[in-house]
Image (cartoon, grey):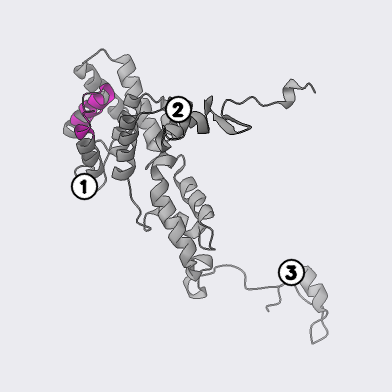
Amino acid sequence: MTEDRLSLPTSVGQAIWGDNLYRGHAVLGELAGNDGYWSAVSLALGGPRLGPDDAAALDDITICALAADPRIWPLKAARVGSAYGNPVAGLCTGQLAVDQARIGPATVGGSAALLHELRRTTPPLGTQTIDGRLDAWISEGRRLPGLGVPFRPEDERLEALRRCMRARGRLTRPHWILMEAINRHTTSAHRLPANVALAIAAVALDIGFTVEQISALPPAFLLPGFLANAFEGAQQRPAVLQRLPDAAVEYVGHPPRRSPRALEQDGPAEDGRPASPDRER
């Protein structure tokens, strides 16, 4: 085997004397004091360094999408994962519970792909073309990510993010305009209002992230809600999440029985007959 086949190239980082390199930047000599969390996340995905305005827009997404109710199933999974006292296990369990799901944060990547496809293949301001394409896709039964708000007329998180983007002067950016056009048409024609995933995708595309990069962003957005449940779950260590009470379990199957090896160790039954594998304990 050649030496080349034993090496794995990377552009992520390098530890050097006196500093660390991160995506080609000196961490202590260049990034420290100048860049924040979202700039580091963007660089992690191969994106650019982010200025304060773009970073603040990502902060807005994090806050508007914040949901920490442990009755929500993925957050409940974080509770189960941390039940033995390890918040990191809970955090990873919760994040894995939403990975590649057809609803929830995993739809942000699909929403970005939808916006990118429509904007790439539609002439500027081609509202009728967009409406017709959406109508055709919906009539064909195509599932469009970022559309649909269960049990309520609109997604209040999208409205909150809209207020934030208005305050930051970002409502005139191209992907946000496209998102609003989609929302107006699908709401009136199909009773399918946009949800916050489509708005998040629009903000991220307008910052300059690619669809692939946006697909990797949800764990960073969701960190506070999952961390809150993982940390509290690890503190509580609830016995009911470590082992279900017997009264909560209904067993349907063979009665309790010993394995052949255990029966050999037990020896013959008291009546002198060979032990039976079906003998109840």
Q: Is residue 146 visible?
A: no
Residue in front for this viewpoint, 271 or 281: 281
Q: Which mark is residue 2?
A: none
Q: What's under tag 1, amino acid-wise? A: Arg
Mark 1 element type: loop
Quadrant location of residue 101? Answer: top left
Quadrant location of residue 211? Answer: top left
Q: Residues within 10 Å of mark 1 (few under 14, many from 20)?
A: few
Mark 3 element type: loop
C-alpha span from label 1 to label 3: 55 Å
Q: Residues within 10 Å of mark 2 (few under 14, many from 20)?
A: few
Tell which tag, 2 or 3, sits nearer the viewer.
2
Mark 1 or mark 3: which comes first in sequence? 1
Q: What's under tag 2, amino acid-wise? A: Glu
Mark 2 element type: helix
What secondary structure predominates along the stretch shown in magenta? helix
Residue under label 1: 152
C-alpha span from label 2 to label 3: 52 Å
Picture residue at 35% right of the left edge, 21% below the top: 117
Picture residue at 23% right of the left edge, 17% below the top: 129
Picture residue at 38% right of the left edge, 26% below the top: 113
C-alpha span from label 1 to label 2: 31 Å
**Lateral position of residue 242 relative to residue 186, left or right:** right
Residue in front for this viewpoint, 255 or 129: 129
Q: Which mark is residue 259?
A: 3
Q: Are marks 1 and 2 in contact (CB under 8 Å)?
A: no
Which region of the structure is painted magenta?
165-184
Mark 2 or mark 3: which comes first in sequence? 2
Residue under label 2: 212
Tell which tag, 1 or 2, sits nearer the viewer.
2
Vertical order, 268 against 161 (above or below): below
